[in-house]
Amino acid sequence: MPFRRIQSLRPESRRLAVASLGAAFGALSAHALPAQVVAGRVTDDRTMKPAVDFVVRLVQMSDTGLVALDESTTDTKGQFTVVAPSAGSYVLSFGRTAPRVHRVPVEVEAGVAPAPKDFPLPIQRDSDTRPYVDVDVDSAAIMPVGARGPAFPDNRRAIDERGSVFAMFVVDTIGRLEKNSLRLFAGTHADFVHSVERWLEVGKFRVSHVGNVPVRRQVCLAVAFQVENNPRQPRRLSKPDVPPAGLANSSRALCSRAVEGPGMMTITANPAPSR
C-alpha cells in the first residue's frame, strides 16, 4: 500500500494496514515491521502505565524549523505507528502542546525493518519545569542573524594564541540568559573565559519555541578563538573536545551536538599591529 494512502488512514486502520504489510514480508520476524514504518509504545516512565490517546508526530528538521510529516494517536495499550516517506533522520514528537512536549531523534534505514520500540517518558509530570534542549524545540538556532560574538582578548591576540571555552546556560522565554544558570568550563585561558562571560551577561539570544509557545532552553555553546595571519588562506580550526569527565551524560551529549551544529561559534581576529 503506497505511503500516502497509509498516511491518510485513521489510527486503527493504519495499524491494520501496517500489519498486513508486515505479513507480506515472510523473511521478517512476526513482530517486525517493514522499513519506513516507525512503531512503538508510549508509557509513563514513573508508573510504566500506557499513555492512552497520546499524540505522536513524525517530524523532520529543515532550515526553517520542524516539518510535520505524519501523526498518530496511541491506543489503549499506548501503541502507535507513523510512516516515514523515505529513509533518513527524523524526530518523534510526543505530547499535545507546550510546555511539555518530548522529542526523540530516530533513524529510518532503507531496507531495514525496525522493530517496535518502547518510549518511557515523564509525560504525567505537569510540574516539570526543566528547560528544553536542542532536539525538543522547533529550531536549534541559538544566535540572532548578524549577532556579534565575544571580543578577542587583545593580550591573546598579541601573541597569536588560539583557544576555546564551553558555556552552558539557560535562555529564558524573552531571549536572555537566566541568572545563576551560567557554567563556563574547559577554557584554555582565563582571558578567553572572561571574554565569553562578559558577552553572555549582556547577550541576546533567539527565543526557542515548541509550536507557537516560547519555552526555556538549556544551551551548550562552544566558542573557539583564532588569529588569522592570512585571511585569504584561513587556518583550519580544530573543534574543541568535549571534556570526558565532569558532565552528566545528557550534558555531554548536548555539548557534543553543539560542536557539530549551531552551538559552535568561531571568533577570528587579524594579527596585532607590529610595534
Image: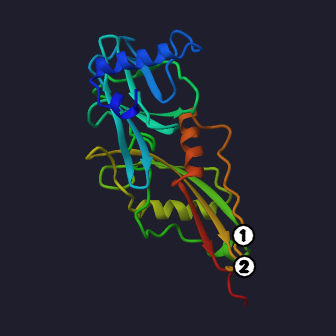
Q: Nearer the viewer, mark 2 or mark 1?
A: 1
**Measured from the top left, where is residue 17 in percent x and y?**
37, 19
Q: Amino acid at mark 1?
A: Arg
**Measured from the top left, where is residue 257 in percent x and y?**
56, 45
Packing grade of label 1 (10 A; few <14, some 14-19, many >=20) is: few
Q: Is residue 120 above or below residue 187?
A: above
Residue 7 versus residue 239: which sits nearer the camera?
7
Residue assigned mark 1: 235
Q: Residue furthest bottom?
A: 275
Question: Image point 65% across, 80% down: which residue?
Answer: 270
Asked if residue 41 lies left or right of residue 29, the reply is left
Q: Is residue 268 above or below residue 100?
A: below
In the rendered image, which quarter is residue 174 located in?
bottom left
Asked if residue 224 lies left or right of residue 145, the reply is right
Q: Is residue 143 above or below residue 139?
A: below
| N-terminal label among 2 and 1 | 2
Q: Contact, CB < 8 Å: mark 2 with mark 1?
A: yes
